[in-house]
Image: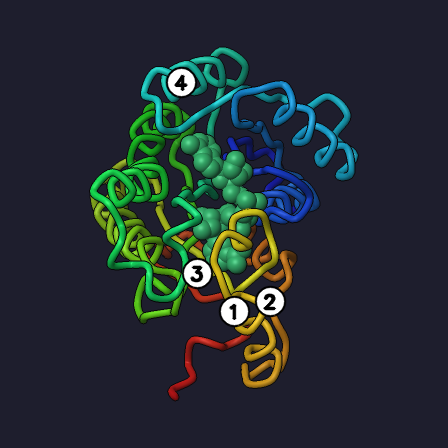
Amino acid sequence: MGLLEGKTGLIVGVANERSYAWHIAKAIMEHGGRCAFTHLPGDRNAHRVKRSLGELGVTDPWLTPLDAASDEQLDAAFQKYAESFDRMDFLVHSIAFADRDILQPGKFITTTRQQYLSAIDISAFTLLGMARRAQPLMKRSGGGSIIGMSYYGAEKVVLGYNVMGVAKAALECTSRYLASELGADGIRVNQISGGYLRTLASSAVAGTDKLEAGVAERAPLRRNVEGADVGKTAVYLLSNLASGVTGETIYVDCGANILGA
Ligand SMILES: NC(=O)c1ccc[n+]([C@@H]2O[C@H](COP(=O)([O-])OP(=O)(O)OC[C@H]3O[C@@H](n4cnc5c(N)ncnc54)[C@H](O)[C@@H]3O)[C@@H](O)[C@H]2O)c1
């Protein structure tokens, strides 16, 4: 029997078959979980997400548009989910955004107020916005598990990561405060700090090719992380195997974060 047999939940953040969320969905379904999905508004986005889910053998996905910057769209997506499913056991938050032109070495100082706020809004606040809407559904299901995706740049300076590092620090801290409040309802909240993976989002950060080469050479496991590595940890965190784990940020980066200079 799969570790997630009988569990149903929502995955936010599949853009294509390279997305961390896609790898997480694959692992969840391999372990018997049932997934609903969102896509950024627009037919092209819907088509791209559908096509990538087709590669997982999902021919008729439950899919709804969601720009997480909009409270109305968050309300509508969770409302629609609640009308379709009688339970929510898990929620995967795998989204981030910052203007590409400030994700370059030397450009943090140029970040405008609006760029700073929108990075934190979409990359961190939305975890709270989604958790608040998931809470009653998870409570009704007897508890649940929420995960998000962070990165080492939350803790240490990674050249070019800039405002996204600030947003990831906010995301990890938001996750701990949510864990402390939602634990009373049997809801766990954790983050996976993933290693570098070539995706649409990561390609916005300048200089990541150098990062990739450095990790392959120096990380304890002498390789870069694969989507499946993160997928397996997601299954663990969403399953009863992690029943006593909440408020944590777990590194899945082939050990790269333990290295000093
Ligand atoms: N790729 C990496 O190296 C890496 C490393 C660590 C953490 N992460 C994190 O993993 C998560 C997923 O990123 P990814 O690398 O898979 O890239 P990705 O581009 O495949 O996924 C990013 C997702 O964010 C969504 N998104 C952006 N703005 C949104 C909005 N306003 N509303 C709803 N959705 C929105 C996009 O549609 C996309 O699906 C992000 O939080 C990212 O910071 C990525």
Please name the residue that numbered disc 1 is placed on: 253
Mark closer to the chain start, 3 or 1: 3
Neighbourhood count class around disc 1 (C-alpha, 10 Å): few under 14, some 14–19, many 20 upward: many
Q: Would residue 102 be found to the left or right of residue 44 on screen?
A: left
Pointer 4: what residue?
73
| Of pointers 2 and 1, the one earlier in the residue sequence | 2
| Quadrant of the image occupied by residue 76 | top left
Between residues 260 and 82, which one lies in front from this camera angle? 260
> Three-letter amino acid code at disc 4?
Gln
Identify the secondary structure beneath mark 2.
loop
Picture coordinates of residue 260, whole percent (x, y):
38, 87
Q: Give the CA distance from mark 3 to mark 1.
A: 7 Å
Q: Are marks 2 and 3 in contact (CB under 8 Å)?
A: no
* Place of residue 59 in the rendered image (x, y in percent of width and height, measured from the top left): 77, 25
In the rendered structure, which disc, 4 or 2, sits on the residue that comes first in sequence?
Answer: 4
Answer yes or no: do the residues labelled 2 and 1 have beta carbons within 8 Å? yes
Label 3 belongs to which residue? 193
For marks 2 and 3, the one nearer the N-term is: 3
Q: Is residue 91 visible?
A: no
Does the residue tagged 4 have its C-beta within 8 Å of any atom of ligand 1?
no
**Circles 3 and 1: CB distance less than 8 Å?**
yes
The residue sitting at 42% across, 44% down in the picture is 96
- How far apart marks 3 and 4 lie (CA) works out to 27 Å
- Residue 255 visible somewhere in the drawing: yes
Identify which residue is drawn at 65% across, 48% down: 18
Q: Nearer the viewer, residue 125 or 30?
A: 125
Amino acid marked by disc 2: Val
Residue occupied by mark 2: 225
